[in-house]
Image: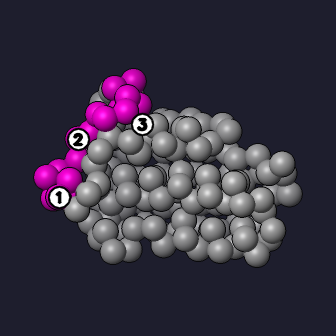
Amino acid sequence: MKFTYEVPGDDFSQAGFASSDIKKKLKKLNVPTPVVKRTAVAMYEAEINMVIHANGGTAEVEIFPDRIEVVMSDDGPGIEDLDLAMKEGWSTASNEARELGFGAGLGLPNMKRNSDEFSLESTPGVGTTVRFVLHIK
């Protein structure tokens, strides 16, 4: 099964729709609860990053009997320093995002922590793609 979602930019009220919908679908498929939670957390972090940094993007989720594959991509400004971006606490979030409780610099590390496989590709001026896989045990 494959699902595609548009993540709107600059609209915090819509962030989390894709992760919430996938969470419901995985529960209906009787995917183990820990895998459902980890998938939802990783996707939510990616959605928030798209809202804060990239004016939105696309979430693609493919569910297989043994794994969940997620690709989150945007056409935002890209990430200048990937190593720095992966450090907990580092953030380029705006004051507005911080005032709303976002931008603590935990998004990318949480995506990686909640995934069994994780990759991050970004080109400044072009955009960012995050891919992660969660194994269903």
Of tags 2 and 3, which is closer to the observer?
Answer: 2
Report if residue 84 lies within the magenta region: yes
The N terminus sits in image quarter: bottom right
The residue located at (28%, 48%) in the rendering is 103
Q: In this view, does 96 lie above or below 27?
A: above
Q: Please identify the quarter of the rendering in which residue 131 is found.
A: top right
**Mark 1–mark 2 distance (CA, rounded to whole Å):** 13 Å
Of tags 3 and 1, which is closer to the observer?
Answer: 1
- Residues at discs 3 and 1 in contact (Cβ within 8 Å): no
Q: Position of residue 126 (x, y in %)?
A: 35, 43
Q: Position of residue 24 (x, y in %)?
A: 65, 74
Q: Which amino acid does label 1 sit on?
A: Glu
The residue located at (45%, 53%) in the rendering is 46
Horizontal relation, residue 39 to residue 95: left or right: right
Q: Residue under circle 3?
A: 122
Q: Which amino acid does label 2 sit on?
A: Thr
Horizontal relation, residue 116 to residue 21: left or right: right
What stretch of residues is rendered in magenta? 83-99
Of residue 127 and residue 39, the one placed in the foreground of this image is 39
The residue located at (32%, 40%) in the rendering is 105
Q: Residue under circle 1?
A: 99
Q: Where is residue 99 in the image (x, y as percent from the top left)?
A: 17, 58
Mark 2 is surrounded, within 10 Å at the Cα level, by few (under 14), some (14 to 19) or many (20 or more) other residues, namely some
N-term-proximal mark, 3 vs 1: 1
Q: Residue under circle 2?
A: 92
Q: Indicate the secondary structure of the residue bearing disc 1.
A: helix
